[in-house]
């Protein structure tokens, strides 16, 4: 059945940030949350992950209500990759990824052989196993993003939640990171929800797109149904046109 979000709303005081959001996602699919700054994308991820408590609505995974689950259960379902992360201590990469095993390790216990095995395998999946003994703080921006994804994978989560995974990355690393995310989702039959700003990246890497504007999903569906000139103009307030090249429709400003 996958993930379903129904009638989800959230407010900061009297400021309504999300207003009746509805979406669905199957396993093996990537959903891109697309929209301008302040539209509610990051807040939606945090509500799904129970970091924030919605004022209304439900989040269902295979028909079970996520918001009624214990935190320990939720942390095994969702692997969360924040927009930015600056650790206060130069942990070795392998130790940093082991934090993803926290839901499985007792308060007074240490990581066991399986925990290390899962952590190393997660690093292999993102091509970062050779950096296992390096300090996390010495990595480049693209490398840190891949290690953050490895930490999320170490939770053995069914759903990855990624908040602007390409923020501050150059052209090469942007496509490297998104390509690895897509490969992992397809090969392991996971689900992923990620926030992006670029419509071209959204339609290249997303199976579904939710176009969010002022806390509401104005359009939801396959990329070809959402990436249209009138919808992009409505959300971003800019005239655009679609240019076809080699079967791909690029969104460019007029």
Image: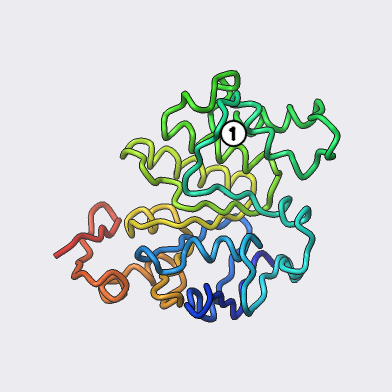
Colour pattern of the rendering: rainbow
Is 129 situated above or below 13? above
In the foreground, 164 or 206: 164
* Front one among 103 and 219: 103
| Residue 131 x %, y % | 54, 21
Q: Secondary structure at mark 1?
A: helix
Residue lying farthest to the front in this orientation: 13
Q: Which residue is mark 1?
A: 125
Residue 38 locus on image (x, y percent):
39, 66
Left or right, residue 224 beside residue 155: left
Q: Quadrant of residue 237?
A: bottom left
* Identity of the residue furthest to the left in this view: 254
> 207 or 123, which lies in front?
123
Residue at position x 42%, y 34% from top? 141
Residue sitting at 41 percent across and 78 percent down? 218
Find residue 150 and report its image quarter: top right
- How packed mark 1 is, by other alpha carbons closer than 10 Å (few <14, some 14-19, many 20 or more), is some
Q: Is residue 226 above or below residue 173?
A: below
In percent of width and height, residue 88 lies at 55, 33
Residue ID at (39%, 74%): 213
Location of residue 75 in the rendering, given as x and y in whole percent from the top left corner = 71, 52
Quadrant, the C terminus: bottom left
Number of numbered markers: 1
Quadrant showing the N terminus: bottom right
Give the residue at x 45% y 45%.
Answer: 178
């Amino acid at each position: 059945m996958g993930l379903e979000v129904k009638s989800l709303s959230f407010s900061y005081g009297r400021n309504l940030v999300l207003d009746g959001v509805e979406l669905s996602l199957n396993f093996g699919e990537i959903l891109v949350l697309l929209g301008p700054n302040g539209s509610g994308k990051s807040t939606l991820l945090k509500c799904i992950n129970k970091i924030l408590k919605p004022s209304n609505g439900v989040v269902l995974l295979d028909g079970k209500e996520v918001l009624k689950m214990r935190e320990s259960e939720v942390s095994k379902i969702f692997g969360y990759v924040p927009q930015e992360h600056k650790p206060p201590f130069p942990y070795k990469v392998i130790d940093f990824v082991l934090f993803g095993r926290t839901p499985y390790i007792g308060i007074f216990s240490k990581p066991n052989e399986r925990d290390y095995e899962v952590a190393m395998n997660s690093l292999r999946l993102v091509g970062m196993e050779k950096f296992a003994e390096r300090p996390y703080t010495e990595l480049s921006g693209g490398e840190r993003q891949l290690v953050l994804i490895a930490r999320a994978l170490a939770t053995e989560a069914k759903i990855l939640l990624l908040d602007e995974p390409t923020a501050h990355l150059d052209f090469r690393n942007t496509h490297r990171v998104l390509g690895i995310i897509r490969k992992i989702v397809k090969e392991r039959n996971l689900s992923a929800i990620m926030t992006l700003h670029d419509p071209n990246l959204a339609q290249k890497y997303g199976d579904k797109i939710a176009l969010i504007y002022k806390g509401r999903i104005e359009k939801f569906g396959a990329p070809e149904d959402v990436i249209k000139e009138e919808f992009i103009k409505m959300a971003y307030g800019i005239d655009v046109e679609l240019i076809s090249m080699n079967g791909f429709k690029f969104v460019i400003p007029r």
